[in-house]
Image (tube, rainbow, N blue to C red):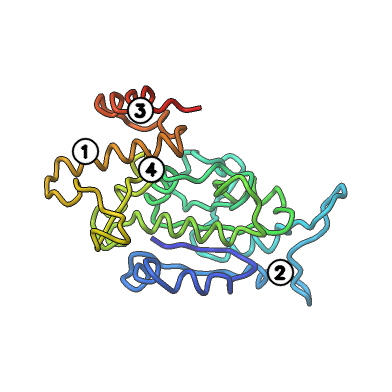
Amino acid sequence: MHFDIFTLFPGMFDGPFDDSIIKRARESGIISIELHNIRDYAEGKHSVTDDYPYGGGGGMVMKPEPIFRAVESVPGLAEGRSEASSLPGNAASERPAIILLSPQGRPFDQSVALELADHSRLALVCGRYEGVDERVRRYLCTDEISIGDFVLSGGEIAAMVIVDAVTRLLPGALGSEHGADQDSHATGLLEHPHYTRPPDFRGWHVPDVLLSGHHGNVDRWRRQQSLLRTWQRRPDLLDTAWLTEDDLTFLEGLEREMPVG
């Protein structure tokens, strides 16, 4: 997969993309990343990329011209864009996805990461200041994503989050073939607790079931712990998680033994 990232601050990406899983995925050719400095496409002596909003108000707005020029300078990204083809879920999905990172976008979660992992190429446009000119949103970008209900100084950190979450899902990116399958949220539930050596640390013991060697009991314990942790911390996830009859029976027992509230 190839990522094109359009930003005013390419230096912010120097550390996060040069270590750990993303570094290995780049070195092995699983992903490639190209950073594009939007300021390089601004006109004038001072390469201005923002201006005051029409109608007044606080803050500055990113100008459309440098963003359009930056994206359109990359072959294959923006041919034939229109308002009709720039809506998420449109039939024009064969074209590369151009995603605006903004607090107003659709929420990013594991299901969206899985959706994006099906693409061979993603373009991420990092917003800044008060926002971007609406014409970027309507006529250039195909999607708009937010990583949470909070405000960051810009879309750069959101771009890092998306690249990391999507890369983990690509074949070969993790050491284990199914390494991402049981992560928190991958199954719709929070993940079970983990333990490693030593079996006794400061008097705190690893649960006996994990030392038993009985794989069926271990799987059952992990599933029930996952259900328990989700029930305690994120009960909203249970509304959409795929649950078996055994899961439902276990949860009903929790409700009887430890009623919430």
Q: Which residue does the numbered mark 4 point to in the structure image?
A: 190
Q: Quadrant of residue 39?
A: bottom right
Badge number at residue 254: 3
Q: Are marks 4 and 1 in contact (CB under 8 Å)?
A: no
> What amino acid type should be assigned to the residue bearing mark 3?
Leu
Q: Earlier in the sequence, mark 4 or mark 1?
A: 4
Residue lying at 62% horizontally and 42% vertically, measured from the top left:
83
Q: Are marks 3 and 1 in contact (CB under 8 Å)?
A: no
Q: Which is in the foreground here, disc 2 or disc 1? A: 1
Please give left or right for residue 166 compared with residue 141 in the image: left
Residue 111 vs 15, above or below: the answer is above
Please give left or right for residue 188 compared with residue 216 in the image: right
- Identify which residue, 51 or 158, lies in the foreground: 158
Q: Earlier in the sequence, mark 3 or mark 1?
A: 1
Q: Which residue does the numbered mark 1 point to in the structure image?
A: 220
Residue 177 vs 10, above or below: the answer is above
Return the residue found at the far front: 203
